[in-house]
Image (cartoon, rainbow, N blue to C red):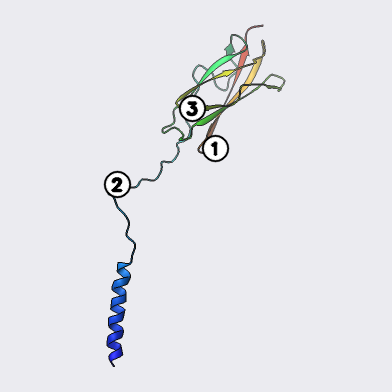
Amino acid sequence: MPFKKYFLIICCALAVMAGGCKKKKKDDGTPVTPPAQEAELAITIPNINLNQDNNAAQGNTLGVTVNVTSTPLPPEGYTITITATNPAGEVIAQNAAVAGTGGSTDITLINLPSLQVAKIVVTVTSNTKPSNTKTFRFGVMNKVP
């Protein structure tokens, strides 16, 4: 039976060719690292007593610095949104949301009511990962009548 002999030779030739057709990875020697996971936002607001109503402004505005100390910072930056309400719960108009990319961003609270405590909510949200958000609350009194 000469067919068995030819059949065996053909099978061996196909096996050798199949191994040669395998795609090979291009390796330039540098390891491929996956993109870093975004770190949870780490924020400080210096000179503000968080969760307290004893912060004071000497007029109807107050400058506040928001420090983002996350390592690494969000690749696409972050957005700071301010919400303010008066003691009756009415919304006090504030500046538009502020975009930041560096470690420190200055914001200004505006329209603070005279001799009343305004409730302030500062929300910092990563532009890369919107679920990565930190919220801070405090009260500010405008001491000027």
Q: Give the amino acid type for the residue marked by disc 2 in the picture.
A: Thr
Q: What element carries label 3?
A: strand
Q: Give the amino acid type for the residue marked by disc 3 in the picture.
A: Ile
Picture disc at residue 30: 2
Q: Is mark 2 on a helix, strand or loop?
A: loop
Where on the picture, by quarter, is residue 26? Answer: bottom left
Q: Residue 131: image x %, image y %?
A: 54, 38
Where on the picture, by quarter, is residue 93? Answer: top right
Picture disc at residue 32: none
Return the residue at label 3.
Answer: 43
Sort mark 3 into few (<14), some (14-19) or many (20+) by Cα contacts within 10 Å: some
Q: Give the mark toward the camera: 1 or 2.
A: 2
Above or below residue 45? Residue 23 is: below
CA–CA distance between discs 1 and 2?
32 Å
Q: Which residue lies furthest to the bottom in this view?
A: 1
Q: Give the amino acid type for the residue marked by disc 1 in the picture.
A: Pro
CA–CA distance between discs 1 and 3?
16 Å
Q: Residue 133: image x %, image y %?
A: 54, 34
Picture disc at residue 130: 1
Above or below residue 66? Residue 56 is: above
Q: Identify the mark nearer the N-term, 3 or 2.
A: 2
Q: Identify the mark nearer the N-term, 1 or 3.
A: 3
Q: Residue 87: image x %, image y %?
A: 69, 19
Where on the picture, by quarter, is residue 85? Answer: top right
